[in-house]
Image: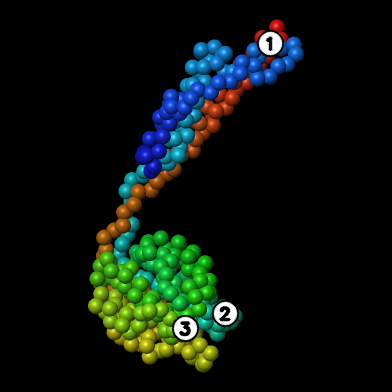
Amino acid sequence: MQFEWPALFLLLPLPLAVYFLLPALKTSAAALYMPGLNSQLFASHSASPAKASRTHMLLMSIIWISLICAAAKPVRLGDVIELPASGRDLLLAVDISGSMEYADMVYQGQRVSRIAAVKAVLNEFLQKRQGDRVGLILYGSGAYIQAPLTFDLVTVQQLLSEAEIGFAGDGTAIGDAIGLSIKRLANNPADSRVVILLTDGQNSAGVVNPLEAAKVAKSENVKVYTVGVGHPRSHRYPIDEVSLQKIAAITDGQYFRARNLSELQAIYDTIDEMETLEQEPEKFRPQQSLFHWPLALMLITLLLLLLDKQLNFSERIKGGRS
């Protein structure tokens, strides 16, 4: 067992510091007078027997120590677990600019938007990525890391499903997306750096030129697989296929044209056939939170303190009447 915030134990002497440093608070002997009752009935606690004072002090000490223990976040650590790591590091760079809302794709017999089609196929793709570490970049007018490389594919799926058009602006910063991908893959094994970049348009935003970014990716051993999403007869949002083909060629990747969901699925099937590489396994220790135990002790002790005070109060009332 260990505490995640052990520094909080420095607060344990705080009540003593308050007791000795602050002036003693004086209260009147009789705060309330009631006819027929002893005038000392509601006197200050200093009139209580010494034994009761020691009991109250003990209970209040337990309450304070239990509260600090709970706030310090005690956890029980399990045995070290190694996650399998025979695969590649894959970064998904997904275009969420305004044009991805255009509905020219067909899914399960219905016309759906491009982003909806991409999400549907990517969801299936992620389910097959056991052993790979996958990260997610969303880009529009700028590029943003949504999930770093991780084996937690469920979280990546969740973050992708929650992505909405316009989150990153209406432009298409392809160069920035590639640049950010290179940065996120810089410390990974040179033979396992793969970027899958999906877009339905042409570079119209950002500060990095896509072809220059591709040259840097080549020097960093990053392969970029580019995917043009959209129907070929769509003139409203044309795809810059020439640039996407050049980016793929420069980085030793491939360019795919996804005119429908079948072609989009075939792209991921091709990537599934890529040779996997052995990587250093990722290790972690499961944690079980234990804060509720000291918190429960504090609450029980507090109830005992209140009950004790209530009993003393009742006895004093009886004594006053007698």
Marks 2 and 3, Cα distance to the nearest angstrom?
14 Å
Marks 1 and 2, Cα distance to the nearest angstrom?
83 Å
Q: Which mark is residue 200?
A: 3
Mark 2: amino acid: Val
Is residue 51 visible in the rendered image? The answer is: yes
Q: Is residue 44 above or below residue 200?
A: above
Tell me the element at label 2. strand
Work out whether mark 1 precedes mark 3 in sequence or the reverse, and give the earlier one.
Answer: 1
Q: How many labels were placed on the picture?
A: 3
Residues packed near mark 3 inside 10 Å, few (<14), some (14 to 19) or many (20 plus): many
Tell me the element at label 1. loop
Which of label 1 and label 2 is nearer to you? 1
Depth check: give the residue in front, 24 or 187: 24
Q: Residue furthest front?
A: 23
The residue to which callout 1 is attached is: 38
Q: Is residue 175 above or below residue 40?
A: below
Which of label 1 and label 3 is nearer to you? 1
* In this rendering, position of residue 262 left or right of residue 251: right
